[in-house]
Structures are given as C-alpha cells and as structure tokens.
Image (cartoon, rainbow, N blue to C red):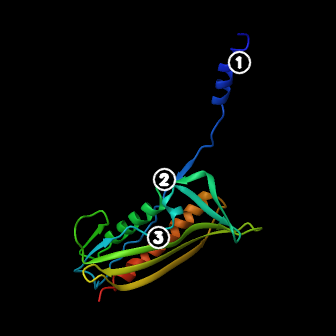
Amino acid sequence: MKHLWFIPLLFLGGCSSTQPHILEYKISPEVSKYEFKSSSCKTKSLKVGRAFTSSELKSQNMRYEKGEYQQFSFTESKWATTPNSAITSALVRSINNQDIFASVSSSQSRSRSDLVLETRVEDFKQYFVEDTNNSFVKVELSISLVDARKNRVIETKHLTRKKEVQTLDAQGGVQALNKAFGELLEENNKWLSGACK
C-alpha cells in the first residue's frame, strides 16, 4: 500500500507533455479575370473531373524533397484540405469565373455536359537543394479536353511552372505553390478559350 500514491502521479506526469502546434495551410491561388473577345466553347457545357494525383496528394501531409532522393513531411505544418480536393475545386472556380463556357459544373454534378476536363497533377511540391540555402516549388499539370458524347480527346495541354521560394519553410513553399498554380490556371483558361473545334 505504501507505493499506490505513485500511480496517479505517473498519469499526471504523462499529461503534461506538449504537442507541437500544427499550422494548416490552404491552396488558394489568385487568378485574374480576362475578358475573352471570343471563345470557341461559348455554346458548350463543361464538367471538370476530379484531378488525378499521386496518393501523397490525397493526404493532408505536406511533403517536400531534399536533394535527389530524400523525401520528408513537415512535422508542424499540414494542408487544411487534401491537395487533390483543393486543386480540383480551384480548377472549377477558376474556369467558372471566366466567360468561356455556357456552363461549368464539378464531377459531383448529375447534369450531362458536352465536354469533360481531365487533369493529371504530375508535380505539386516544394524542393530543397542539398547543401545550399535554396528552395523552389514545381507545379506540373497534364490537361485533356474530352468530348463527352464521342469519348474522344479534343485537345491536350501540358503546363509547368517552377518558382523560387522566398523563405526556407513551409509557409514560403505554400506562397510559391499558390503563385505558380495561379499562373497555370490563367494559362489553362486562355488555352480553353480556343480549344473547341
């Protein structure tokens, strides 16, 4: 019975350890609105399919690469929403804000459409150059515009951007990723405005 007082103290001691505060970051690119003088897709409806991504972009973990072969996760930072979902939502929002198609819907919509936009995310990550104080991000998308009725590809486009990071941390990487992604969305919109034949 002498040693029973030690058990509650042991549990109380375990509760006093502190966990690191996790910062959440969101993918929220800024996209300029353009006044397209004409669009070959003006009479067409578009459905934006869910982006095809690697499994790591279906997680809230923020991954980065160092050197040629090493890959890590930021321990005190994570995505507020999985990049897979956020990239798809940004595509829908970006195209919908332009005057390119008669209507734009997401993959969850039950409505039929004339065209489907398929997107494969080849890269969406921050890189650290080994043995130097340099970091950059790379965003790479492969996009196909598909005729939904004939099930054939009308046009394809490969988009890529590389941006230097201003601060060597997760926040600097997120800022650069949002900037690079925003530029690719603008380029995608310009391409879509003339993609229908």
How many numbered marks have been drawn onto this rendered protein structure? 3
Residues under labels 1 and 2: Cα distance?
A: 41 Å
Q: Are marks 3 and 1 in contact (CB under 8 Å)?
A: no
Residue at image position (30%, 84%) is 37
Q: Which mark is residue 85?
A: none
Left or right for 108, reference 53: left
- The amino acid on which the numbered mark 3 sits, given as a three-letter code, is Gly
- Image quarter (top left, top right, bottom left or bottom right) of the N terminus: top right
The answer to which of marks 2 and 3 sits earlier in the sequence is 2
Q: Residues within 10 Å of mark 2 (few under 14, many from 20)?
A: some
Question: Does residue 163 sit above or below 64 in this rendering?
Answer: below
Label 3: which residue?
Answer: 182
Label 1: which residue?
Answer: 6
- The amino acid on which the numbered mark 1 sits, given as a three-letter code, is Phe
Label 2: which residue?
Answer: 80
Q: Position of residue 17 (x, y in %)?
A: 66, 34
Q: Is mark 2 on a helix, strand or loop?
A: loop
The answer to which of marks 3 and 1 sits earlier in the sequence is 1
Residue at image position (54%, 76%) is 161
- The amino acid on which the numbered mark 2 sits, given as a three-letter code, is Ala
